[in-house]
Image (cartoon, rainbow, N blue to C red):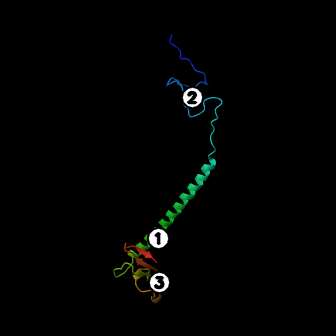
């Protein structure tokens, strides 16, 4: 008959792998008099963290959304100006004025809006990057 393993009582901490009693090196209490293991309430900490993270991410999202809307607006005006009529080569830094004719077509001019009879749309300046900035 094979030799039967001797079962240790539940309160005895015996490591079957190392064949040693190792209660003293455990990271937790192993006897009835040891402090109880209880989870700490992290709900408040989590709620504060969630609130802070949500505020931070919402702020960043709003900034990116605002920048995106400005980029779309800038793209719209550049598309309009690059597709409008003008018979000169624009100079970087110079201010130009966009007008609407009676037939609905647009054109760019150096003439100020106060002295011109056409419908004024807006003033623009060409940057060194060849981007039109609305003034």
First in sequence: mark 2 vs mark 3: 2
User: What numbered label is drawn on residue 73?
Assistant: 1
Dot 1: what SS? Answer: helix
Question: Disc 3 marks which residue?
Answer: 119
Q: Is residue 56 left or right of residue 82?
A: right
Residue 75 locus on image (x, y percent): 43, 70
First in sequence: mark 3 vs mark 1: 1
Quarter residue 130 falls in: bottom left
First in sequence: mark 2 vs mark 1: 2
Tag in front: 2 or 1: 2
Tag in front: 2 or 3: 2
Q: Decide: marks 2, 3 in contact (CB < 8 A)?
A: no
Residue 84 higher or lower than 117, as above or below: above
Residue 116 higher or lower than 135, as above or below: below
Dot 2: what SS? Answer: helix
Taking the spot 44% from the left edge, 71% from the top edge, the residue there is 74
Q: CA distance from mark 2 to mark 3?
A: 90 Å
Q: Residue extending furthest front?
A: 24
Q: Residue extending furthest bottom?
A: 115
Q: CA distance from mark 3 to mark 1?
A: 21 Å
Residue 108 locus on image (x, y percent): 40, 81
């Amino acid at each position: 008959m094979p030799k039967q393993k001797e079962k240790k009582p539940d309160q005895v901490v015996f490591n079957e792998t190392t064949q040693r009693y190792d209660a003293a090196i455990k990271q937790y209490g192993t006897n009835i008099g040891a402090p109880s293991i209880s989870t700490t309430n992290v709900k408040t900490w989590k709620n504060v963290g969630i609130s802070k993270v949500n505020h931070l991410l919402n702020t960043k999202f709003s900034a990116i959304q605002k920048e995106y809307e400005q980029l779309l607006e800038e793209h719209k005006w550049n598309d309009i100006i690059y597709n409008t009529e003008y018979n000169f080569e624009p100079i970087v830094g110079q201010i130009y004025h966009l007008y609407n004719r009676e037939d609905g077509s647009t054109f760019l001019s150096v003439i100020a809006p106060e002295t011109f009879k056409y419908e004024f749309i807006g003033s623009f300046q060409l940057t060194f990057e060849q981007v039109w900035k609305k003034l």
